[in-house]
Every structure is written in C-alpha cells, then in structure tokens.
Image (spheres, grey):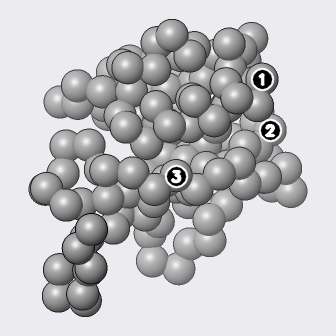
Amino acid sequence: MSSTTSTDAPTVIEALSWVHVRDGRLLCVRSENRDRLYLPGGKREPGETDEQAVAREAREEVSVVLRPGTFARVAVIDQVAHGQAAGTRVALVCYTAEYDGEIVADNEITELAWIGHADRERCAPAVRDLVGLLHARGLVT
C-alpha cells in the first residue's frame, strides 16, 4: 500500500442528497447526458447549510418542498466519483426529510426511478453503496 501525500491527494467532491424510500425502493434520478442514476441533490452554493442545499436541490430536481426541522443524516458515503477525472472521489452526504408536494422530474432531470437492491447496478457507485447500506438496515428490499 502506498502512502498519500498532500501533492497527490485525490480531489473530493462533496454532494448533498435527499434520501427518500417508499415501499422498499429508493428514489433516484437521472440527469441529461448521464448514464447512471443518482440521488436528488448536488453541490452546496456559497453560504448554504446542508439542509438549505438539500432542500434547494430537491425542489429544483423533483419539485418537492422539504420540511424544515425534519432532516436526519442517514450516512456519508465515500466512493469513486462516477463520470469524473480519474482519482476523483465523492463524499455523498445523505439526508432524509419529510416533504410536501408531488415528486415529479424537473429541470435537467430526465428520469425518475424507484430502485431496489436488485437494481442497484443502474446507479453511480456511491448510490450503489447507499442502496446496500439501506438494504442491510431493512429499508430497501
């Protein structure tokens, strides 16, 4: 095993995401020009808290309003970042939250999918890991 110095440390992208499970399936989305499914979410804008970023992204991507005060962190997944330069990793910070509205694809989202454990290969690596974690907890079938 080689050691990592500050000059060759991997680039890490922090992504904040909304985790929503219904009937044993995880809500996933696919954006234009993407070949894998992801969670609704994205990068934080300057000055945003985790909750503000997740709420903004959920509203932009799946048209729901996440309720303040209902957020709970599920996990932070460290994994290879799909579709990024070699060596890039993602820190996928996952939150659940109650919501108002109807889940519908919006803006750049071209597909909504409800993913079970058997379907996880359709997802980006970090989301696959989350599906496995949720399956182990008995939340995803």
Relative to residue 57, is residue 140 depicted above or below?
above
Q: Which mark is residue 98?
A: 2
In-image side of 64 versus 83 (left or right): right
Please provide percent x and percent y for residue 137.
Answer: 76, 31
Sequence order check: which comes first, mark 3 or mark 1?
A: 3
Q: Quadrant of the C terminus?
A: top right
Q: Which residue is mark 3?
A: 77
Number of residues whose C-alpha sits closer than 10 Å to that of mark 1, classed few (under 14), some (14–19) or many (20 or more): few
Which numbered mark, 2 or 1, is in the foreground of this view?
1
Relative to residue 51, is residue 67 depicted above or below?
above
Q: Secondary structure at mark 3?
A: strand
Which numbered mark, 3 or 2, is in the foreground of this view?
3
Residue type at numbered disc 1:
Gly
Relative to residue 53, is residue 112 depicted above or below?
above
In-image side of 13 versus 139 (left or right): left
Sequence order check: which comes first, mark 2 or mark 1?
A: 2
* Label 3 – label 2 distance at C-alpha: 21 Å
**Which residue occupies 24% across, 87% down?**
5
Could you tell me if the residues under marks 3 and 2 are in contact, i.e. CB atoms within 8 Å?
Answer: no
Q: Which mark is residue 138?
A: 1
Residue at the far bottom: name it: 6
Could you tell me if the residues under marks 2 and 1 are in contact, i.e. CB atoms within 8 Å?
Answer: no
Relative to residue 71, is residue 65 depicted above or below?
above
**Which residue occupies 76% across, 36% down?**
99
Residue type at numbered disc 3:
Ile
* Label 2 – label 1 distance at C-alpha: 19 Å
